[in-house]
Image (spheres, coloured by chain):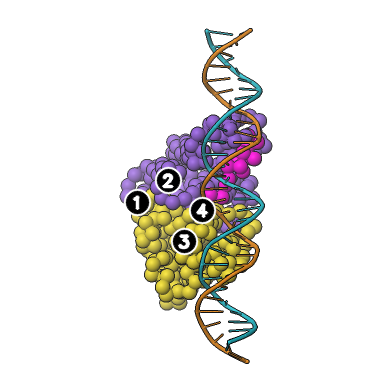
Chain colours: A purple, B yellow, C cyan, D orange
Amino acid sequence: MTIRDIETPLAATAAALGSKERLIAAALSLFQAKGYHGVAISDILEATDLPKGSLYHHFPGGKEELAIAAVGFIADEIDARLASEFAKNKRAGAVLLELAHECVSWLRRSDYTQTPLLGLLAASPGESALTQAICDAQKRWLARFETALGGTEEAHDKACLALASLEGGISLARMARSSDLLIRSVTLAALHINQR
Amino acid sequence: MTIRDIETPLAATAAALGSKERLIAAALSLFQAKGYHGVAISDILEATDLPKGSLYHHFPGGKEELAIAAVGFIADEIDARLASEFAKNKRAGAVLLELAHECVSWLRRSDYTQTPLLGLLAASPGESALTQAICDAQKRWLARFETALGGTEEAHDKACLALASLEGGISLARMARSSDLLIRSVTLAALHINQR
DNA sequence: TTGGCTATAGACCGGTCAGTCTAGTCTTGA
DNA sequence: TCAAGACTAGACTGACCGGTCTATAGCCAA
């Protein structure tokens, strides 16, 4: 399963993937659209056309374990993507813009219902394992940008701006139903980040 | 009721405010911490120590009407705040930084449970009146920055970056439980915005 | 005192929630 | 061929959800 399978969550994947992957794909797609508390187990089962027994077989920990798996999946995907882009010696600003454009097509494809990253997924209070998983994902992405930018104090600042403009831009764009806002903020941020 | 009452949601306000205001204050505080779907009516009633009848008397539309009122309240508060700051001819970057610092103290006071703005409040799908209310709030704040920055195309870009870095920075900071990330991203954004 | 209005009070309802449990069906390897 | 594990299947449970309903308390005007 790759990130592509998630982007077309239901029809295309149902045939090719195993139940566990289908559950993760559907759960991620739904959580990104409605947040953890906004999605019922029954929604996920309906989307995957699987019975309850399957879900609790693969994820004995229930809803939260499934959500953590979904977060882990998207975290790995994006982390790997960042690693491969940076390995080509691209400038951080260029990588950021590329990621933003991918988010735009994601937003458009889902009719602005999904948040491609993790921002709105949680809305859950402090100590849960789910929140921790989201936190870890953000840390890893931040670290990718930071090292790519040179690992200095200034690099840290710029990495923060990169992710913040991306997450914030997604939030703005999603609400306004216009990817324009995301592109504008990220473009400006990328400009600043590429300055040395 | 002012924005201050919300920041210390329970104890301080209980005595001074009427039931309706107490409901709005508690609802806003809870929604900011756990998102719309993460808060039960019973949570709000418990926080305000009011019976169900009172809530449905003041808000016949139930949970959603209360949430819309809460969004409207914070939208007005911040909009007014922005208007008054810009009226003093402050530079946009300075106003942004000031707002960010207020968000920081807000985050700290709530032990990083609340999102001071609206980003995580929704996690609700497209067409609802609540989503529309949040969208309107963002538009108004965006317009404040845009006009303060001169109303040009470039001003629009900068306004997007301002709000995106703020919303995104809050999201990062909240997850990492460190206001540092918010300050870093907003400071950098403010720098860029103040450039002419 | 009375009548009407605003607001409080909380029992109650049908629906839905996450999660459990038992039974059945595949797959696989000896 | 058969036994054992992996997986599917869905009825069932108790808790909790948002919302409705009736009853009552406080207040001010007639």
| Residue A73 in view | no
- Quadrant occupied by the N terminus of chain A: top right
Secondary structure under tag 3 reads helix
Secondary structure under tag 1 reads helix
Front label number (4 vs 1): 4
The amino acid marked with disc number 4 is: Gly
Q: Which mark is residue A154?
A: 1
> Could you tell me residue B76's position as x and y percent?
51, 71
The amino acid marked with disc number 3 is: Glu
| Residue at 55%, 46% in the rendered image | A31
The magenta-colored residue range is A37-50
Read off the chain for label 4.
B
Could you tell which of marks 3 and 4 lies nearer the N-terminus?
A: 4
Determine if marks 2 and 3 fall on one subunit.
no
Alpha carbon of mark 2 to alpha carbon of mark 3: how far? 22 Å
> Could you tell me residue B129's position as x and y percent?
62, 62
**Residue annotated with mark 3:** B46
